[in-house]
Image (cartoon, helix red, strand yellow):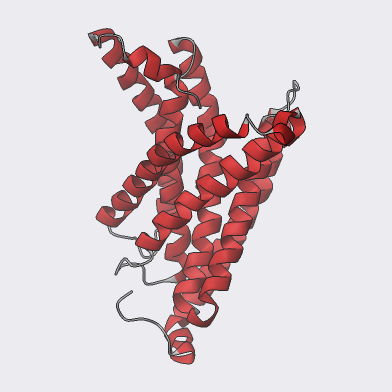
Amino acid sequence: MNLMFFQQSLQPISLHHIEQIAILVLYSSFSVLIWFLLALWFDRRDPEPARQLFRTFFLGSLMALLMFFINNYLVSELKSLEILKNALFFTLAISFIIDGVLEEGGKLFALFKVYRFKDFDQPLDGIIYGMILGLGFAFVENIFYGLSAQSMETAKNLLLLRGLTSTFMHFVSGGILGYSFGLAKFYQRKKLLLIFSGYISAFLFHGSYNLIARINFDWILLPLIIWLFISYEGVLKKISYLTRISPNLLAIMKRDCRLNPKD
């Protein structure tokens, strides 16, 4: 992402500009809706309240807005470091530190708020809320990318492509992080360890995806799709596992005896 659209925003806003923004919102919403419905299908047995899902989506969107400004500032600072004059080192730093550590750190921060929802009462809920949070993040990020495109046609194509790749990546990474929160909610003795391990997994997945995406060759989509598919399969296994242990939730709580009733 870059700050090009801020320069454009200094010009008087016309009806045409408003229409362009509306189109970008529509295109970003379309792909997000597809993955949103998939999350609802995963949660079909005991659905979360709609108000909590939209609160979570909003938190993800808000975090993406905050990360946009932080990331742009840090990227400009990283460019001044001598060690990052090397293209490979710079790409690694952007992919894993800026994209991975910081963006997943933003999701981590938001999930601590979600963690305290009264309706967060099953391990599987962690994955569902994490996925929805990731979609809120992707929704705003996609619009920023569309605004920085050279033309509206380029923006449309970019958002359609991101809907199948980057949006899904945020969906999966949110699920990975949410899985750790789902376990931590009910295994209080290992709470910090579970959350930390989930964060490490999420930022490594995110960083690896972005590193692959920055490799410039004709068949770039193939390794991206393979990496997303492998990671998605991992999330499906986690969903299956949490679905199995959820009926035993009371036994888990009694064994641990350290669940905070305020949560």
**Which residue is located at x 66 percent, y 34 percent?**
81
| Rendering quarter of residue 99 | top right
Would residue 172 be visible to someone looking at this image? Answer: no
Q: Residue 223 in the image: x percent, y percent?
A: 73, 35
Q: Is residue 74 above or below residue 51?
A: above
The residue under the point 37% across, 41% down is 61
At horizontal 34% and vertical 52% (from top left) the residue drawn is: 56
Query: Percent position (x, y) of residue 229?
Result: 65, 45
The quarter of the picture where residue 98 lies is top right
Q: Quadrant of the C terminus?
A: bottom left
- Which one is in front, 205 or 99? 99
- Residue situated in front as seen by the camera: 45 or 196: 196
Does residue 116 lie above or below 222 as drawn? below
Q: Residue at x 29, y 51 (%)?
A: 55
Q: How many marks?
A: 0
Left or right placement of residue 95 versus residue 184 in this view: right
